[in-house]
Image (cartoon, rainbow, N blue to C red):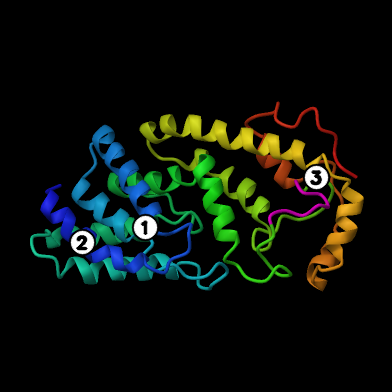
Amino acid sequence: MDKILEQRIYAAARPYYTDQDPAHDWDHICRVCHFGRVLCREENADEAVVIPAAMFHDCVKLRVGHSPRDDSSRLSAEGAEEELLKIEGYPKEKITEVKLCIYEHSLALGIRPESLNSKVLQDADRLDSLGMVAIMRIFAHCGTWGGRGEGGRLFFWYDPFCENGREPDNKACGLDWVALRLSKIVPLLNTTTAKRLAMPLERNQNEFLARLRGEIGFFPSAEMQAMQEMQLPARVRNSLGAHPTPRGQLSDAISAQHPSIGADQPARK
């Protein structure tokens, strides 16, 4: 794409991210643009669609739990259209596809796109949801959720990997979000190039989870749980009565593709 035109789009998109949370800020956009360029070259996608879509794809980001779930993507697509219509030299016939790419990119919506450009934007965004940087993003995002009682906790001492009955709660706990969300990414990638780029990123994040399991094991879980429960809200305390299962959803998500991770770690009681 023409560099002057790209700079105009940059100038239009950049102000939208001034107050975004750390997981969806301009640094995230820059990384997605980089992945997008690599994928466009390898997969023969259209940079004039993918790069503007990457720049605007999170320009409206509503709080976790907002309903309806597609509002962020829909509003971002509308914002991209409004700005691109004003940019001199941008081909107006591409705007409809830019909007479609933005609308379809969201992992939460679960859309499997048909167009190559939309597949590439999805993959570029999802590659930034893998690896160590992705883990940093999630815990940074976790810190924006609010009070310690209802959200923003790093992990729960009781059943941290959901192996003994606790249901994952990614609105309250960063570790639940890491394992549940990140474990979904690789099977949902669309392109051969993205799957190749994902391999070292996935290894890094799974190594992190394995090492974290070991560090959590240093602490006396019963004592730490008792201290933590003193400040838990009622809805979370009540969840402790959930029916136990031999192996929980979160542990399964971590070890499904890597059975060796945590294999030597007994379930915590």
* Relative to 122, 209 lies left or right: right
Percent coordinates x, y for residue 93 in the rendering: 14, 60
Mark 3 surroundings within 10 Å by alpha-carbon count, few (fewer than 14), some (14 through 19), many (20 or more): many
| Lower sequence index among marks 1 and 3 | 1
| Lower sequence index among marks 3 and 2 | 2
User: Label 2: which residue?
Assistant: 95
Instruction: Give the residue type that dot 2 points to.
Output: Ile
User: Label 1: which residue?
Assistant: 26
Q: Residue at x 69, y 60 (%)?
A: 153
User: Label 3: which residue?
Assistant: 163
- Residues at marks 1 and 3, CA–CA distance in whole angstroms: 37 Å
Instruction: Give the residue type that dot 1 points to.
Output: Trp
Q: What secondary structure is found at the residue carrying circle 1?
A: helix
Nearer to us of marks 1 and 3 is: 1
Q: Tell me, yes or no, whether the highlighted magenta stretch contains residue 12.
A: no
Nearer to us of marks 3 and 2 is: 3
